[in-house]
Image (cartoon, helix red, strand yellow):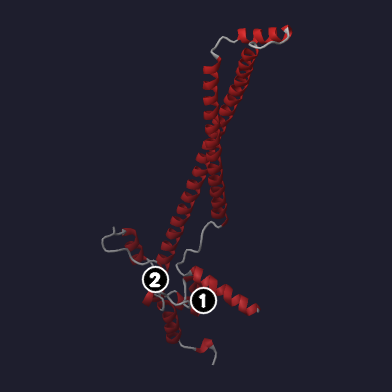
């Protein structure tokens, strides 16, 4: 006897067992159960299964398992009650499914915007730190040049106390006379300023490495989120997909 010879009562019982198997224990549903996709696939096979798979008892089980009702203290949605009373439960499932899909799409969009704002903020900080780093390096270059000149003046003032040719002595005397600041105190101040510049440059280099790593991680996360935009919206879709992949592999094996 072929499957098409089975009575409607038996087919109805098979479909009810397939859809209510997960609703009995929603926390740990079995891997084999009929989902909304299975019912939709059955509905396009023949007129008989289209009629049986559209019954409210089947979609009521799917509604309870995939979209459990809110807690008693939650706000009651009047649109859901009106739609359930005026249309079939299959249409109500479609409405809630599309609403859940839209919520997930908006949540996914918010995640992308948050990551993009983090990348933009980190990029702004990197530009500011690069600007400050360039200023500190220029400041250190000027400080080093002035420090070298003052050290030459100090060496010239020391060399004036010993005998040397008049040509060299005249050059050193002219260098000392052109310096109108106290050499030792100025050298000490420049050495302190040079140490501060080196410390600031090291801090900026360290902060730049941290921000660059942060930007790289955020960009990788953004590419991953954009590459995998939205998961399956059914609560058991991922598990069914895994089993489907496993069945395909075993079939090819």
Asked whether the beta carbons under mark 1 and mark 2 sit within 8 Å of each other, the answer is no
Residue of label 1: 42
Residue 217 visible within the image: yes
Above or below residue 161? Residue 117 is below
Q: Which residue is mark 2?
A: 65
- Residue that protrudes farthest toward the front in the picture: 163
Q: Position of residue 253 (x, y in %)?
A: 65, 79
Determine the secondary structure under disc 1.
Answer: helix
Q: Is residue 124 among the parts visible in the rendering?
A: no
Residue 178's place in the image compared with 60, above or below, is above
Helix, strand or loop at label 2? It is helix
Instruction: Identify which residue is drawn at 50% across, 64% down.
Output: 232
The answer to whether residue 16 is left or right of residue 210 is left
Q: Residue at x 46, y 52 (%)?
A: 106
Q: Which of the image's four quarters has the N terminus?
A: bottom right
Number of marks in the rendered image: 2
| Distance from the alpha carbon under mark 1 to that under mark 2 | 19 Å
Q: Which mark is residue 29?
A: none
In front of the other: 133 or 173: 173
Question: Could you tell whether 173 is left or right of 129 in the image?
Answer: right
Q: What residue is shown at x 52% (from left), y 29% (from top)? A: 196
Disc 1 crowd, CA 10 A, few/some/many (<14, 14-19, 20+): some
The structure residue drawn at horizontal position 51% and vertical position 77%, both measured from the top left corner, is: 47
Residue 45 in the image: state x and y as whole percent.
55, 77
Q: Is residue 107 left or right of residue 141?
A: left
Choose between 119 and 185: the one closer to the eye. 185
Residue 157 picture location, percent across and down: 62, 12
* N-terminal label among 1 and 2: 1
């Amino acid at each position: 006897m072929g499957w098409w010879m089975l009575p409607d009562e038996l087919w109805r019982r098979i479909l009810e067992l397939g859809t209510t198997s997960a609703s009995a224990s929603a926390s740990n549903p079995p891997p084999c159960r009929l989902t909304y996709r299975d019912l939709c696939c059955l509905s396009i096979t023949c007129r008989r299964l289209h009629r049986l798979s559209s019954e409210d008892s089947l979609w009521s089980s799917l509604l309870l398992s995939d979209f459990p009702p809110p807690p008693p203290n939650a706000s009651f949605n009047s649109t859901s009650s009106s739609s359930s009373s005026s249309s079939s439960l299959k249409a109500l499932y479609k409405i809630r499914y599309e609403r859940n899909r839209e919520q997930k799409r908006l949540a996914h969009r918010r995640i992308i915007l948050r990551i993009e704002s983090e990348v933009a903020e980190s990029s702004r900080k990197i530009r500011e730190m690069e600007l400050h780093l360039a200023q500190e390096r220029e400041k250190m270059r000027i400080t080093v040049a002035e420090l070298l000149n003052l050290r030459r003046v100090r060496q010239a003032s020391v060399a004036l106390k010993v005998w040397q040719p008049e040509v060299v002595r005249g050059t050193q005397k002219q260098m000392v006379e052109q310096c109108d600041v106290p050499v030792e105190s100025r050298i000490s101040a420049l050495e302190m300023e040079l140490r501060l510049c080196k410390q600031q440059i090291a801090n900026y280099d360290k902060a730049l490495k941290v921000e660059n790593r942060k930007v790289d991680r955020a960009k990788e996360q953004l590419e991953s989120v954009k590459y995998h935009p939205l998961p399956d919206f059914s609560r058991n879709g991922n598990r069914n997909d895994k089993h489907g992949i496993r069945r395909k592999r075993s079939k090819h094996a």
